[in-house]
């Protein structure tokens, strides 16, 4: 294990090795190195058990919208636990927090989407999407409409259905996925896959892959198309400007549902309440999680268009749900989280102040010898690491992204590596001074990475 100065760090690392199976981890590597132990947090900063202060450039896992350490959320959780710590929503039963939350979420959602099915996570939300979509078409007398079209390298969770809906090969290789009835099309990743096409031409080409797949599978068999407004875990893939208008044009031609996975984009990250607002999309279903509670407690859900609800509600029992659907404590925390986002005008501040500033500072990195492209939108950003700027050629086989990520850890910054793409998604409450800190540390880590790969 790595050398530590705090004896308790070593004890915790031994507990990890002896008892804990971490998500998305190489267990042998983790055992040899030992996990970094995070002990407390405030605002946009974390502290580990060795006393190091770290700027969290990823808001946890895209989720800590209002920052760490907000007592208001802890207080409402404690109050709700004392009043009603748990009750289920089965058997014609409900409780005030979930009903009030459903109303508030419906007020924020695009027009015509006034119902919410709550889950424990975004992954569960996308499992629910699969069930809802297929049930909807069966009720409409078209049970053969089962196929859901998704995108290569999209991310929709890690449950069996969520991982199948997602298009990540590494996940599909473990567990004989995807399950039947799910197919994938190209992603709108111009920098990595656009070749000699202009971004505009590539965006149209990628969108037209949807129509090709609908015709290949047969419109009579296609239930829905699911996509993130901006692919998050895939590397902050921001589609060319031509992409979403063409997708909307294609969707208008065919009788299929559109599902917007808003788990990352939702609740202010783009400077609008939802990515669907930013791109003027009109989804039939929207998956939500993460920013719903700022990650303080697990909760997800699916916002459903009224026309879909009308069909579902006339079809008898919908035999689907979870023990913790609409958990009262989670609902209370979500309500308080949304109150803070509203009352402190955090989403407006992102749109008008911090997002423009972050995007300006981020693009200053484009002059770095290691950087092939910088892109971003709202409080999302990506930095492509390349060997040759002109050809976009990578440092094959060196794992440059992981090298850079380690330099970030060692220098007080969390910046995630997706292959050789470094990505950020800081808390929505980040200040301009903290953005300066993030970008200054990022440049330093890029310098160290360049020295390491060319040394």
Image: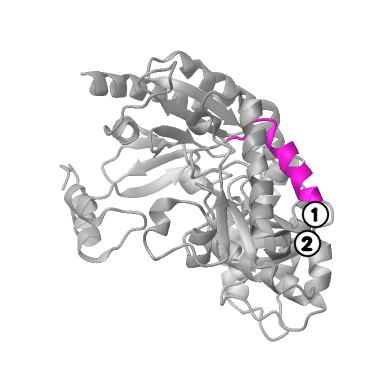
Residue at the (48%, 62%) spot, across then down? 178
Residue 397 at x, y = what percent? 27, 34
Query: Vertically, is 97 above or below 377?
Result: below
Query: Vertically, is 140 above or below 78?
Result: below
Extreme-front residue of the structure:
216
Is any part of residue 434 visible from this angle?
yes
Query: Vertically, is 421 above or below 343?
Result: above
The residue segment tinted magenta is 238-253
- Asked if the residue under mark 1 is in contact with the one under mark 2, i.e. CB atoms within 8 Å, the reply is yes
Task: Name the residue carrying label 1.
Answer: 107
In this orientation, which residue lies closer to the viewer: 68 or 119? 119
Residue 249 at x, y = what percent? 78, 42
Mark 2 secondary-structure assignment: helix
Residue at the (71%, 82%) spot, across then down? 93
In this orientation, which residue lies closer to the viewer: 27 or 173? 173
Apparent side of residue 452 relative to residue 360 in the rendered image (left or right): left
In this orientation, which residue lies closer to the viewer: 82 or 333? 333
Task: Name the residue carrying label 2.
Answer: 103
């Amino acid at each position: 294990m790595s050398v530590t100065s705090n004896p308790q760090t070593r004890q915790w690392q031994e507990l990890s090795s002896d008892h804990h199976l971490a998500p998305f981890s190489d267990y042998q590597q983790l055992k040899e190195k030992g996990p970094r132990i995070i002990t407390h947090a405030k605002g946009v900063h974390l502290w580990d058990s060795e006393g190091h202060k770290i700027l969290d450039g990823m808001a946890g896992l895209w989720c800590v919208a209002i920052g760490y350490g907000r007592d208001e959320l802890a207080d409402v959780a404690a109050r709700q636990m004392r009043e009603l710590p748990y009750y289920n929503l089965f058997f014609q039963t409900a409780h005030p927090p979930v009903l009030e939350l459903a109303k508030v979420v419906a007020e924020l959602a695009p027009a015509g989407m006034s119902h919410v099915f709550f889950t424990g996570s975004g992954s569960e939300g996308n499992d629910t999407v699969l069930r809802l979509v297929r049930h909807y078409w069966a009720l409409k007398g078209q049970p053969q409409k089962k196929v859901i079209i998704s995108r290569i390298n999209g991310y929709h969770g890690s449950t069996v259905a969520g991982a199948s809906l997602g298009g990540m090969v590494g996940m599909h290789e473990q567990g004989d996925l995807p399950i039947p009835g799910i197919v994938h099309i190209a992603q709108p990743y111009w920098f990595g896959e656009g070749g000699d096409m202009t971004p505009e031409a590539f965006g149209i080409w990628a969108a037209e892959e949807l129509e090709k797949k609908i015709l290949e599978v047969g419109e009579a068999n296609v239930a829905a198309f699911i996509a993130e407004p901006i692919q998050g875990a895939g590397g902050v893939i921001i589609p060319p400007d031509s992409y979403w208008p063409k997708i909307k044009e294609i969707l208008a031609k065919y009788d299929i549902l559109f599902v917007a996975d808003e788990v990352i984009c939702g609740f202010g990250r783009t400077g609008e309440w939802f990515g669907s607002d930013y791109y003027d999309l009109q989804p039939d279903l929207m998956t939500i999680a993460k920013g719903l509670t700022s990650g303080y407690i697990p909760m997800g859900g699916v916002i459903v268009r009224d026309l879909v609800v009308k069909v579902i509600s006339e079809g008898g029992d919908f035999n689907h749900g979870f023990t913790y659907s609409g958990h009262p404590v989670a609902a209370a925390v979500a309500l308080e989280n949304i109150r803070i986002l509203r009352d402190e005008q955090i989403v407006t501040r992102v749109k008008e102040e911090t997002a423009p500033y972050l995007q300006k500072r981020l693009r200053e990195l484009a002059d770095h010898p290691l950087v092939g492209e910088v892109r971003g939108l709202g409080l999302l950003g990506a930095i492509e690491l390349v060997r040759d700027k002109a050809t976009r050629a990578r440092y094959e086989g060196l794992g440059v992204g992981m090298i850079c990520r380690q330099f970030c850890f060692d220098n007080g910054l969390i910046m995630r590596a997706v292959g050789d793409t470094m990505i950020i998604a800081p808390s929505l409450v980040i200040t301009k001074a903290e953005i300066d800190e993030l970008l200054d540390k990022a440049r330093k880590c890029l310098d160290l990475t360049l020295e390491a790969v060319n040394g």
